[in-house]
Amino acid sequence: VPLVESGGGFVQPGGSLRLTCAPSGFSVSWLYMGWYREAPGKARELVATITTSGDITNYSDHVKGRFTISRDGFRNELYLQMNNLKPEDTGVYFCNAGGTASDPGQTWGRGTQVTVSS
C-alpha cells in the first residue's frame, strides 16, 4: 500500500484530531499531496491539498479555518490537523498523492475513519 493513514477515531463536537499519512517508496516532497473524505452516502470530496514546495495550500470551504494540512520531509509524513470538529466532518479520510489543487492523483491510501458525535 503506497499510502498509510492513521489517527482517525471518535471525537465529540468541538474536539480535535490529527491525521497522519505515511508514504511508502516516495517522499512527501516529490508530489502534490492531499486529503479527501467520503461521508456515508456521499461522493468523495477534497478536504485540503499542499504543493511540492509546501508553501501553497488549498482547502475546501467546509473546513477552511478549522483544518490545517502540513508535511514533514524529515519524517516523510503528511498531516491533517482538524480542530473544532463538527458532526458533518464524519467520514473516511483518504490520503492522496500526485494530484492538483482541484483533482486527486491516482495514488490513494485505504483511509481512516473519523466520527464526530455527541
Image (spheres, helix red, strand yellow):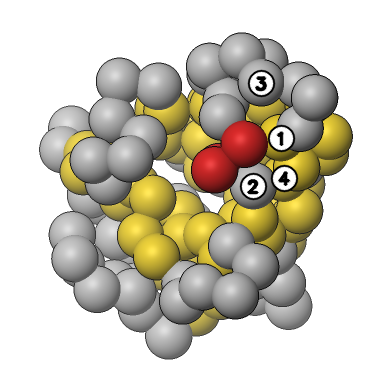
- Is residue 22 something one can see in this rendering? no
Identity, as a three-letter code, of the amino acid under mark 4:
Val
Mark 4–mark 2 Cα distance, whole angstroms, equals 5 Å
Mark 1–mark 2 Cα distance, whole angstroms, equals 5 Å
Residue at figure coordinates x 34%, y 47% from the top left: 48
Mark 1–mark 3 Cα distance, whole angstroms, equals 6 Å
- Horizontally, residue 64 falls left or right of residue 77, namely left
Looking at marks 3 and 2 on the same chain, the residue that comes earlier in the sequence is marked by 3
User: Are dots 1 and 3 in contact, CB under 8 Å?
Assistant: yes
Q: Which mark is residue 80?
A: none
Mark 4 or 2, closer to the camera: 2
Identity, as a three-letter code, of the amino acid under mark 1:
Val
Residue at numbered disc 3: 13
Could you say where residue 4 lies in the image, as x and y percent from the top left? 72, 61
Could you say where residue 108 lies in the image, as x and y percent from the top left? 56, 75
- Decide: is 99 above or below 7: below
Residue at figure coordinates x 46%, y 76% from the top left: 43
Within 10 Å of disc 3 (Cα), the crowding (few <14, some 14-19, many 20+) is some
User: Are dots 1 and 2 in contact, CB under 8 Å?
Assistant: yes
Residue at numbered disc 2: 90
Mark 1–mark 4 Cα distance, whole angstroms, equals 7 Å
Between 73 and 70, which is closer to the camera in this rendering? 70
Residue at numbered disc 4: 114
